[in-house]
Amino acid sequence: MNGWSRKSFCFAALAVVASLLMSSALAAQTPLRTLIVGVDHRKAVSLNGPWHYLVEQPPSRELYDGEGRIRDNGYALNTHPNISSGPHNSEYDFSTAPVMNIPGDWNTQDPTLFRFEGVVWFQRDFSFQPAPGTRTFFHVGAANYRSVVWINGKRLCNHEGGFTPFDCDATALLAPGNNFVVVAVDSTRHQDDIPSVSYDWFNYGGITRDVSLVTVPSSFIDDYDVHLKHASSFSAADTPVLAGYVHMEGAGAGKQVTIRIPEARVSAEAVTDADGKASFEVRAAGLQLWSPQSPKLYNVEFRSGNDAITDAIGFRDIRVDGTRILLNGKSIALLGANMHAEAPVRGGRANTEEDVKNIFGMLHQIHANFVRLAHYPHDERMLRMADHEGILVWSEIPLWQRISFSKPEVYDKAVVMLHEMIRRDRNKAAIIFWSVSNETPNNADRTHFLTNLANEARHEDPTRLITSALIGPKVSEDRVVQEDPLMPALDVVGQNQYIGWYEGTAEEADRKTWVLPQKPFIMSEFGAEAKFGNHGGIHDRWTEEQQVNVLRHQFDMIRKIPQMRGVTPWVLMDFRSSTRNIPRLQDGYNRKGLFSEKMEPKQSVPLVKHAYTEDPPVKPE
């Protein structure tokens, strides 16, 4: 896993030239980091809570020097100004700065930062007592978009990407007693970022997920995978076989590893190879498979030497057969919705148990068995809840539209993000799809890029299906033909379209004939905007009545497409977007939600609920 962490990270100097700068020296100065799986199942010291913060207006000269390199001699040192005598520091003082709750975006906590995109510095003091024979990692669940971490004035690590975690070995920098950490987060957009400069969701900046110190033995379990062995065919009559691996960081060859599932009477032992990886297979007679109807989870115990971790894991088989999607050998229909990582009611990034409970409450109201987590990996709490609640999941990395598909360095970033997503969540039974993109342009560079990425995902995790949400079918009068050359690389194809909103009328959907290849399809986006409480006729835009009319005709159209195996209307709940600026109708929100941002159900909710329970728009067969 450390190979990619040696790659350079791109950091901005000035807004005009930042996306062009890449410092190879940066990685060399930065200690290698790992990514610890199951952090939320380990004992940790939480650093959540109030942090001091300072805002740096562009061109961010305290974080970057004139050539775009990270500065380690400014705010990172956390010095204090000597008012009476002595040299100036950089004319700052964290100790008297305001505080902000972490995790949390800065946009919704400080009114002056609501639309701010740039650098904000965070600082916190903490006490720590190192234990002999252990290592301690600084864990960040996510920070958007570029992050630099210093502990006690020394650079610890850097990370690029706003939606995946990172763990940095802080052992050498921590001292007994009082310590401090400084984190600079830069949310500035650049062309060669992922996502790029333009997207239809709000660019929340900050440390948006949990922060903690995780202490482990000097040789410890940093990664593991246990799943139902993916054979060429599946039969419920066969004795289940569990397969996977345990990776020991700092172990090398010859380390014994034990895997136990007491409830299923499963026990296996394996020995690490030269890379610290121990692979295993074990029969599990009587194992109850995970499904939406019975989301069974087992406590799986991993142990080696002085380290042990227990995780709650479910086991299931997902595959395609012609145009069918098979879960545990049975055809399924996926009925759900899209959802952004937006906190209901309070707004901002979703990152609490209450946020997750509210989101799943809305999914249950429409009787969903499926959710597309758009357009980036969501908080790990979402996946844990999906496992417990039996909601199937589409998980995606943020490759959306204006990506620099011709640049190898951008592909390298995408591979890192893909690996971080899969590594964190590969043991979540609820996830059945890894998605490599959403609404990307149909050209040769894009197709080559995403085909390679799909193959990378398949190589990294052959137990799940690979998908992407496409746009741009050819329309000739009432004939719709999808011929996107990316489709051969996908197991399941997502199709986005907005007949009745961005094109034509709702009634025109009734006449459409879709010509699609013989693969499983999901109608991954469709819908219309409606402001909660705004009423009128079925053809009056922005009304709840028009939204109902569009969805009704969409469902009728989808029922006639034989390859359709899933539907996810856009979107479960209204969410903030800086591109949605019609006063009194949008006010900075995408209004296609079935629910308002305050969880108020629109008239579309009973329509979708009835469709999902009484007259499903897609069938398993």
Image (cartoon, rainbow, N blue to C red):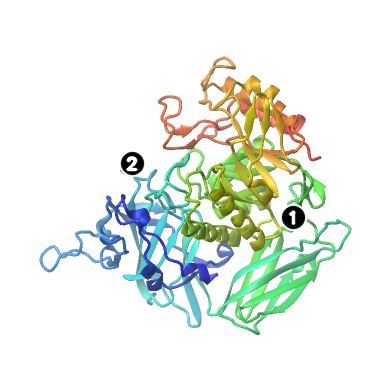
Residue at 71% of width from left, 37% of height from top? 516
Of the residues shown, which amino acid type is indicated by label 2?
Pro
Q: How many marks can you see? A: 2
Crowd around label 2: few <14 · some 14–19 · many ≥20 (10 Å): few
Of 512 and 582, the residue lying toward us:
512
Q: In the visual, does 589 lie left or right of 456? A: left
Above or below — where is 220 with respect to 604? below
Residue 391 makes an appearance in the image: no
Compare residues 568 and 12 and report the one nearer the observer: 12
Residue at the far right: name it: 237
Horizontal placement of 464 versus 37: left or right?
A: right
Which of the pair 601/241 is nearer the observer?
Answer: 241
Indicate the secondary structure of the residue bearing disc 1: loop
In the visual, does 309 lie left or right of 16? right
Element type at mark 2 = helix
What amino acid type should be assigned to the residue bearing mark 1?
Lys
Residue drawn at point x = 31 percent, y = 50 percent: 15
Left or right, 481 with respect to 527, comes to right
In this figure, which residue is indicated by the disc labeled 1? 296
Q: Which residue is mark 2?
A: 111
Q: Is residue 158 above or below residue 217?
A: above
Q: Name the foreground residue: 259 vs 566.
A: 566
Place of residue 547 in the rendered image (x, y in percent of width and height, measured from the top left): 59, 24
The percent position of residue 229, horizontal first and vertical second, equals: 77, 63
